[in-house]
Image: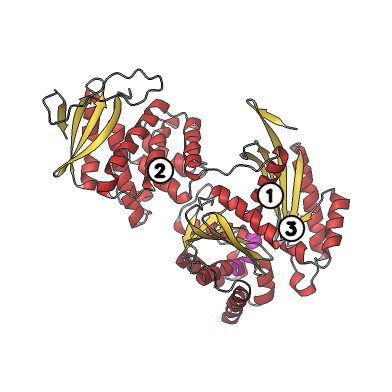
């Protein structure tokens, strides 16, 4: 039945995806704006495509297993009192000569109507999920949904679908067609790569553009990400947004193809029930990256079930569910997470305001990449959430909470950078002997050094936790940076805090700091907007006070 959160009615819906390798269920509680909360997520491997390439039909054993799985999933969904269950079937059922019999069995024995979707519909559902969770506005992207029977490639320019191709390159299909040895022989590996290339050339040909990024969804991508994370010694709460380069994918493929099935079943991060088809699946990913000439891979953990659920929400509420704005949505998620951790809201928001003002004043002169502003603002909002554990070492607790937090809209890499920036808002600066800092690559270490230095300075400027400073501005004088502090009264403690915490800034940017207080008129605005500042310059005899660190 519908539930209510505050005054907003929410509906419970379920989406079932009958795939070639597995059947998946997602139960969610959804609002009219398209946002939803997952209540249950179930998967069962049925290998419905087993033998399909040889016989052209779904096997009796696989169909029986699938029917039992669907009965169980329907019972789970009904236990949540869902209003509607949407069921789709993809490659295996779509291609099977006995698909009508299978659809009729599901209707008669389970009581569910199956919608066997076309390759175009499958690609559109997959892309709808991707565009909801990734900012594609300024990118050429190749979105790949890899299943057991097929791989859908969706080419999109600036968030608009250019073309959709379906290739018979599913991990189950290729394993059965090309792999006859254990471990994989050179001959089988060559046959596998040749088949992928031939299908790509025949169906896709030469793409109209070179993608900036490949975004992958499906069980093989999830497994690849989990294996990679454990190889790196890093485990995140989700694989959404996890990034790999083509060289990393190739390295993982070379590692897996030299192992026997028994050895692959023990590979950290890989489920044993996928060990027999993982080599073919990862080979598809690596070959597609090569053929598309793309070096950057991002993982998407939702896939077509998410797209189906969004359609169900639109049907339930009579409109298309809205798409989330990437930056705004990410900061909303950060603020929600901070609230859940019981953060000191006024101080944290104030530090974020000062930090972003500093960033804006420094960006052009110090050539700060624009994308680092979001990392700084998020770290400022979250820098003291470690108080949730205790005060002692709260900066380290903040790091761990952020690393494992559910921060929608942020990739694992962004979360790790934010966690490090927040971790260094106090005490020791970033050091290579710290494990969390040492595992970052060289460029990411520089990001952490730059933004933690700015965050420290901003945090020092609210040392009294009284939000006395109304705003800051940056001025360059020869070999030093002069920071004008606008406040109604002389903020002695905050200036002292800035002097103390500004040492890392001077070390990182190799420039001396100086501060000047500029008296600000009292603001009578109820929203606490920045107060009007007197028009006297710092060089005049107005009584403005300058303090050098």
Mark 3 highlights which residue? 117
Q: Residue at x 65, y 76 (%)?
A: 178
Q: Position of residue 322 (x, y in %)?
A: 60, 42
Give the distance between the C-alpha atoms of the residues marked 3 and 1, in whole angstroms: 11 Å
Give the distance between the C-alpha atoms of the residues marked 2 and 3, in whole angstroms: 39 Å
Do the residues bearing badges 1 and 2 touch, measured as CB atoms within 8 Å?
Answer: no
Q: Residue at x 22, y 32 (%)?
A: 484
Mark 1 highlights which residue? 308
Q: In this rendering, is residue 515 above or below 360?
A: above
Q: Which residues are magenta?
A: 272-281
Q: In this rendering, is residue 54 above or below 285?
A: below
Please tell me whether mark 3 sits on a helix, a strand or a loop.
loop
Disc on the earlier residue, 3 or 1: 3
Q: Quadrant of residue 376?
A: top left
Please tell me whether mark 1 sits on a helix, a strand or a loop.
helix
Q: In this rendering, is residue 358 above or below 533?
A: below
Q: Residue at x 56, y 72 (%)?
A: 257
Determine crowd level at label 1: few under 14, some 14-19, many 20+ residues with C-alpha closer than 10 A. many
Determine crowd level at label 2: few under 14, some 14-19, many 20+ residues with C-alpha closer than 10 A. some
Viewer-side residue, 531 vs 65 = 531
């Amino acid at each position: 039945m519908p539930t209510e959160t505050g005054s907003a009615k929410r509906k419970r819906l379920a989406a079932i995806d009958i795939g070639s390798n597995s059947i998946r269920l997602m139960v969610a509680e959804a609002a009219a704006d398209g946002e939803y909360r997952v209540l249950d997520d179930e998967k069962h491997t049925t290998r419905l495509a087993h033998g399909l390439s040889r016989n052209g039909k779904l096997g009796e054993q696989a169909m029986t297993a699938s029917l039992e799985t669907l009965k169980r999933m329907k019972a789970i969904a009904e236990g949540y009192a869902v209003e509607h269950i949407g069921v789709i079937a993809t490659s295996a059922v779509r291609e099977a000569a006995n698909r009508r019999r299978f659809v009729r069995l599901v209707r008669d024995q389970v009581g569910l109507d199956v919608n066997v979707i076309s390759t175009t519909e499958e690609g559109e559902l997959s892309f709808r999920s991707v565009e909801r969770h990734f900012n594609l506005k300024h990118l050429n992207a190749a979105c790949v949904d890899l299943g057991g029977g097929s791989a859908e490639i969706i080419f999109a320019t600036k968030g608009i679908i250019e073309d959709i191709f379906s290739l018979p390159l599913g991990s189950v299909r290729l394993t059965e067609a090309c792999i006859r040895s254990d471990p994989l022989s050179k001959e089988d590996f060559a046959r596998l790569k040749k088949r992928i290339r031939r299908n790509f050339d025949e169906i896709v040909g030469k793409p109209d553009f070179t993608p900036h990024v490949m975004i992958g969804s499906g069980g093989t991508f999830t497994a690849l990400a989990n294996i990679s994370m454990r190889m790196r010694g890093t485990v995140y709460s989700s694989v959404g947004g996890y990034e790999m380069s083509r060289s990393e994918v190739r390295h993982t493929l070379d590692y897996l193809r030299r192992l026997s099935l028994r050895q692959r079943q023990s590979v950290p991060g890989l489920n044993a029930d996928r060990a027999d088809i993982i080599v073919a699946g990862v080979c598809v990913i690596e070959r597609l990256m090569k053929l598309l000439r793309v070096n950057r891979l991002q993982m998407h953990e939702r896939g077509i079930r998410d797209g189906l659920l969004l359609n169900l929400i639109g049907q339930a509420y009579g409109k298309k569910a809205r798409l989330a704005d990437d930056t705004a949505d990410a900061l909303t998620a950060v603020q929600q997470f901070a609230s859940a951790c019981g953060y000191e809201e006024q101080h944290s928001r104030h530090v974020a305001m000062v930090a972003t003002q500093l960033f804006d004043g420094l960006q052009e002169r110090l050539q700060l990449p624009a994308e680092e502003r979001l990392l700084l603002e998020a770290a400022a909002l979250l820098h003291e959430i470690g108080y949730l554990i205790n005060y002692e070492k709260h900066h380290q607790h903040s790091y761990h909470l952020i690393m494992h937090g559910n921060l929608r809209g942020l990739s694992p890499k962004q979360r790790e950078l934010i966690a490090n920036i927040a971790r260094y808002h106090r005490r020791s600066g970033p050091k290579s002997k710290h494990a969390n800092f040492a595992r970052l690559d060289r460029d990411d270490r520089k990001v952490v050094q730059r933004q933690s230095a700015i965050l420290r300075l901003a945090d020092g400027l609210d040392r009294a936790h009284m939000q006395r400073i109304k705003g800051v501005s940056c001025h360059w004088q020869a070999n030093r940076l002069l920071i004008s502090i606008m406040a109604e009264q002389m903020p002695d403690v905050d200036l002292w805090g800035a002097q103390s915490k500004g040492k890392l800034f001077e070390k990182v940017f190799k420039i001396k700091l100086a501060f000047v207080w500029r008296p600000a008129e009292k603001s009578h605005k109820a929203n606490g907007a920045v107060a009007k500042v007197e028009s006297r310059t710092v060089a005049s005899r107005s009584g403005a006070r300058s303090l050098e660190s």
